[in-house]
Amino acid sequence: MSKMLQRLLPNQVVQSLPELHHIVRPVETYVNCSSCRLMCNKGDAHQKWYFNDKTKCCTFYPKLHNWQLGRIFLSDSPRRHTLIREEMIRSNSYNALGLHPPEDYLQKQVQSGYPESFGKAAELLCPFYEKEMRGCSIWEYQNTVCRSWFCKHEEGSRGLGFWNSITMLGSYYEKIIAIWCIEQYDIPCQSPMDIHDHIDWYKRCAQYVETIPESAIQEMRSDFVEDAIQHICKYYDDFDRPMPNILRSAVSKFEFRDEEVILMGYSEFARIITPRSIFRFLSKLDGIRTWREALRESNQEGANLSEELIVHMFKQDMLSPYHEEDFQVGMRISVQYDDDVLKMTAPIPDIEIYGVPKGASLKSIT
């Protein structure tokens, strides 16, 4: 983890966080940005669950602080220098603190219905997205928000919480270091600074942060940092949680697709496609049977489900520990669809159902 943080933050800052040095960076095997699994296939009837193939998830305008911009301008990449300079001119949304989303971009966010439009609205495409390579043109210098965001997580909601905590920690330091540069050093050409003055200032900031004194780093370590570290460690420790014998359904949404069903748990981005016979299994999670007993009975009835699928559903928070105080054993839910009622004997709370065919009944679902 320290190597990843060193790519995001000055080395002196990383060294001041020894509590995180033991953490091994989680490998998110479900994510492959070069071959995005969430890009919409043209003609797919379920486009609402997928990203625009012209944008992927890059419908976000990243904040780049003075010292981060300086790192880019000090790099040996004239192409990146030109890209940042042109965006500064186009947006006119830069100052001594750095480059931030321009007003017209923020208005587009509102008009597009953000965050529902995330990954879909082409007008929100990041200015640093490289269309030919279908990826970020400044990835090595990108901020923590982008570098620590994943659409899916090997450890489900615990992975999401872990990376969100990394984002909060990194974003805090990115900003507080930029403010430190302004407070410690004279900003050149105060009245006014043109774009060339700003670029020179950004370069100086990148050099300043390499020599931040230890006393300044210790002053930056606030209660916010302590809380973020505590959350990171907690989520990391929870990665090895045991799978209990008694489970309940934690499916939040599902949608029928042909002979299959799309299940969702902690996130709409994290989906599992299973046979419809999964409902046989879910209906047997009554707080009495173990999940293996429920699986064996379901397969005896022809469900043809594997243990690997059930374990995967647990890790993706579509199954969770059963607590007697949460549900009554064998509780029923019913969903009205036209003239039909779908009923399931299982603790399945707060479910949203999509794509239920007209005339559907319990028999056709199970």
Image (cartoon, helix red, strand yellow):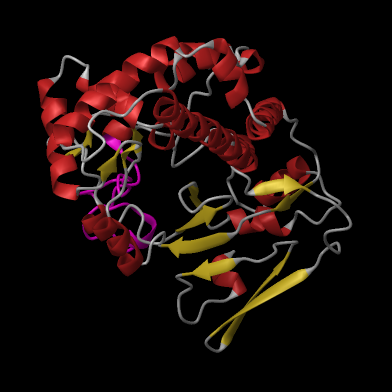
User: Does 92 appear above or below 243?
Assistant: below
Spot occupied by residue 239 in the image (x, y as percentages of width and height)? 66, 28
Closer to us: 347 or 187: 187
Asked whether the viewer can see residue 247, the reply is yes
Spot occupied by residue 93 in the image (x, y as percentages of width and height)? 25, 47
Q: Residue furthest front?
A: 191
Closer to us: 256 or 243: 243
Q: Is residue 219 magenta?
A: no
Asked whether the viewer can see residue 306, the reply is no
Q: Residue at x 70, y 25 (%)?
A: 237
| Residue 363 position by quadrant | bottom right
Q: Is residue 65 left or right of residue 359?
A: left
Closer to us: 229 or 304: 229
Q: Residue at x 48, y 73 (%)?
A: 356
Q: Quadrant of the C terminus?
A: bottom right
Spot occupied by residue 349 in the image (x, y as percentages of width and height)? 70, 64
User: Does 228 appear above or below 37?
Assistant: above
Spot occupied by residue 271 in the image (x, y as percentages of width and height)? 48, 49
Total numbered labels placed on residues in the image: 0
User: Does 342 appear above or below 179?
Assistant: below
Q: Is residue 242 left or right of residue 105?
A: right
Q: Residue at x 31, y 69 (%)?
A: 111
Magenta segment main secondary structure: loop
Q: Is residue 56 magenta?
A: yes
Q: Is residue 298 left or right of residue 132?
A: right
Q: Which residues are magenta?
A: 35-61
Q: Residue furthest bottom?
A: 339
Q: Residue at x 62, y 56 (%)?
A: 251
